[in-house]
Amino acid sequence: MVEIVKPALENLPSYKAALERGWSPDNVRLEQATREQLAAIAEDPVAFLASLDDPQAKGGPISLPDGRKVPRLPGFRRWIWDGEASGSIGFRWQKGTAELPPHVLGHIGYAVVPWKRRRGYATEALRLMLDEARAVGLPYVEITAKPGNPASHKVILANGGKLVERFFEDAAYGGVESLRFRIEL
């Protein structure tokens, strides 16, 4: 059974083990994000866990891949769980609107550990996260995926997503072509 769980100390060893196996919860920053998370866990595990749950956007600014600093949006991360860490899914939004700043690629992003892909974990995690998005009161969420990532397209479409546009990502992410999907809530 796949569920999404709030990151907690008792589950941290399994999450850390996934990072140590080379998995990254960040599909853009990859190994850099993995190294940063392992260092943060080693430095202060409790603070690391707290940083993953910030629905009031009280944390400091976010560093984009190009080094620019931008204000943090409200958001939180959940771990995809089947008895052990199987991935990560995050949700972010702006208060009072469904719109996102240009440097934010989507409301929801996810990554499943390579050794558990193609089992429906991302599809189920996204389905569960949509309930969290409804609770915030958004009318829809947007999710982006690269044109060459049919597995992610399938996950989004299985959850009611519709392709709304092809666009070029913010320069911070390399300005590459991407697809934007929308899921009505």
Image (tube, rainbow, N blue to C red):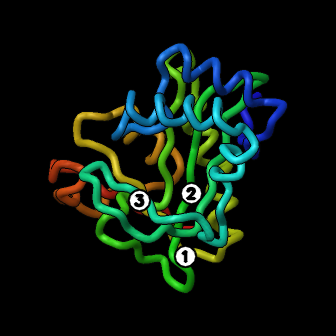
At which x and y percent is residue 147? Answer: 23, 41
Please identify the quadrant where the C terminus is shown. bottom right
- Is 167 above or below relative to 116? below
The answer to which of 104 and 12 lies nearer the viewer is: 12
Q: Secondary structure at mark 3?
A: loop
| Disc 2 to disc 1, C-alpha distance | 14 Å
| Amino acid on which the number 3 mark rests in the picture | Gly
| Amino acid on which the number 1 mark rests in the picture | Pro
Q: Quadrant of residue 62?
A: bottom left
At which x and y percent is residue 88? Answer: 58, 38
Looking at the image, which residue sits at the far bottom? 96
Tag shown at residue 106 = 3
Q: Secondary structure at mark 2?
A: strand
Q: Nearer the viewer, mark 3 or mark 1?
A: 3
Query: Dot 1 surroundings within 10 Å: few (below 14), some, or many (20 or more)?
Result: few
Provide the residue designation for mark 2: 91
Whether residue 24 sits left or right of residue 96 in the image: it is left
Q: Quadrant of residue 182?
A: bottom left
- Is 101 above or below relative to 120? below
Whether residue 91 sits left or right of residue 80 in the image: it is left
Looking at the image, which residue sits at the far right? 10
At which x and y percent is residue 71? Answer: 44, 71
Q: Quadrant of residue 31?
A: top left
Question: Are discs 2 and 1 less than 8 Å apart at CB?
Answer: no
Question: Are discs 3 and 2 less than 8 Å apart at CB?
Answer: no
